[in-house]
Image (cartoon, grey):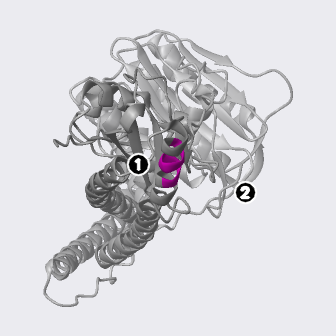
Amino acid sequence: MSVTRPAIPERLGGEPAAHAPDQLNATAGRPDLARTRPEVTRGGPPTLRAGRLATAFLDWWHSSMRVRVITITLVLGLAFGLLLGSLLYQQIANGLVAQAVDSAQRDAAQQVALAQEAIDSIDRRDDAALTVAAHDLVLSMAGTNAELGRQVVLSPALDNERGGIVPAIAVGVSDDAVPAGLREALAAGPEDQQVVVVPVRMVDREEPVTSVVVGSRMSLLRAGAYDLVLVYPMVREQETLDLVRGLFVAAGMGLGILVGGLGWLATRLVTRPLERAAVVSRQLAAGHLDERLPVQGSDELAQLATSFNTMADSIQLRIRELRSLSQLQQRFVSDVSHELRTPLTTIRMAGEVLHAGRDDFPEPMARSAELLQQELDRFEELLTELLEISRFDSGAVTLERHREDMVRVVRSAVDGVQALARSLGTDVVVRLPDGDPLPTAMDGRRVARVLRNLLANAVEHGEHRPVTVTVAATAEAVSVCVRDRGIGMDEAQQERVFDRFWRADPSRQRTTGGTGLGLAIAVEDARVHGGWLQVSSAPGEGSCFRLVLPRNEAYVIAEAPPWRDPSSGAPLPDDEVPPLVLALANRKETS
């Protein structure tokens, strides 16, 4: 008798499936013994919520290297464990199925031979005796339940033409539980044993049980050909697979915990020195130059700490050298300025005497007396500004704040440059906000000096075109914009415009002289008020200098005010105070 291998269904414990004869003679497939997962219908979240979730996930992902390393290690470890567990599980499942099929085939062949021998040995050949014998034979072959043995179905073959003398007999299962494909295969090849693994509904169970179904052909004497189908439930095999699945799940959870713990430990060994390096770096940036990293061992992290400490030593030494040099320069400037005061006073007194009597001198000598007086004025202005710069450098600036009207200070500064503007043919246009005066907590002398410097530069570089002074205010701050329409500056010149002794065009003839320190002092005056002095310019379009000051001495402007509207990107007009970020004077943030 030839034996063909069974066609195995996709999973144990599923619904019965119809099989064609050619499928029944196919090579045994690999079963999927996993439980079927219920389908989950997920509603698509709104686009905005999805964007927020994606942004939050990216922020969380990039927030810590430890998070990334542990997550990647855990995912890869679980993926590897899942793959290995699946392979092992399938191997175990295939082995159990193959063992069950082989055992069922051997037992079925023996049972069919014994049954055929028993039928052939019956003395009485009438229908009643044959039916009783067949019924006893089926009961003797069947087990008591699905866990303890085989179930039996004896039914007329599809090609039986004798009318079914012995009716179909089934124990443990119903007659219609036999797959139609199995019976068709027996009709096509009655000499072969047909085997299939399918879910079969048992009499004593609600759920189908995956079973090995073995069909064979036998003859019941005058009743003709009958199909003897033996059903071997794979209950114990399924229980074994459930146990193995539970063990694999527990092992997977343990593996996940182990991999996560190892990843956390490994990243901790690496990130702790890096976190310490970040803390020390911030302390160095804050001015604590004596901070260093501890060096432990001789591994790569120890080498990193050693290199970091060497770099910190070099930076500390360099900063000390620069600080010492800066202090020497400041002291030199201050000492020279003070020392020149006395001879300058003597020279000025002599110069004033010469200047007062210049009408009695010949023309060349009279002209020399005038030039001497002009240069003495410029020299005295330079000394005054050098002394002021040295005060800023040494932190010895004294700010005398009072509640003063910004409108009055602006008008006073404009009046101070009117003579220069008339001599150059330049109109100075003042645009003031409507309403009451603008009381501001400021040092009026310093603010007036800033405005006079800005106005003098605007008139000097304005190419005889009008200069506009615009004042704007809110309850928190006041801004003054001085705009000319002259030659303008490019970006490189704007970056250096507040440097000491720097001029946009050193060779350009100047009307008012100047020392190159005016804007450097002006930006420092704005800073000590907690404000900003900014410039915006373009070649051929002129320049706009904007002074923004807080009106209350308890606040400072923490960030540089923008030149463009943050929402639209359009340039802000001069008659509007730009958006500001205010902070308390002690640098604590406030709204």
In terms of secondary structure, where does tag 1 sit? strand
- Rendered image quadrant of residue 536: top left
Q: Residue at x 33, y 40 (%)?
A: 218
Asked if marks 1 and 2 touch (Cβ < 8 Å), the reply is no
Does 37 appear above or below 494? below
Does 324 appear above or below 492? below
Q: Position of residue 492 (x, y in %)?
A: 27, 31
Q: Position of residue 512 (x, y in %)?
A: 39, 29
Q: Quadrant of the N terminus?
A: top left
Front residue (pair 267, 255):
255
What residue would you read off at disc 2? Answer: 554
What residue would you read off at disc 1? Answer: 230
Under mark 1, the amino acid is Leu
Q: Residue at x 51, y 35 (%)?
A: 166
Membership of 133 in magenta stretch = yes
Residue 109 visible in the picture: yes
Under mark 2, the amino acid is Ala
Q: Position of residue 11 (x, y in %)?
A: 41, 45
Q: Position of residue 282 (x, y in %)?
A: 39, 69
Within 10 Å of the Cα at label 2, are there few (<14), some (14-19), or many (20+) other Cα atoms? few
In terms of secondary structure, where does tag 2 sit? loop
Does 390 appear above or below 10? below
Q: Which sits earlier in the primary sequence, circle 1 or circle 2?
A: 1
Front residue (pair 324, 81):
81
Q: Give the main secondary structure of the magenta stretch.
A: helix
Residue extent of the magenta highlight: 131-136
- Observer-side mark, 1 or 2, equals 1
Is 174 placed left or right of 275 in the picture? right
Gap between marks 1 and 2 measured at Cα: 97 Å
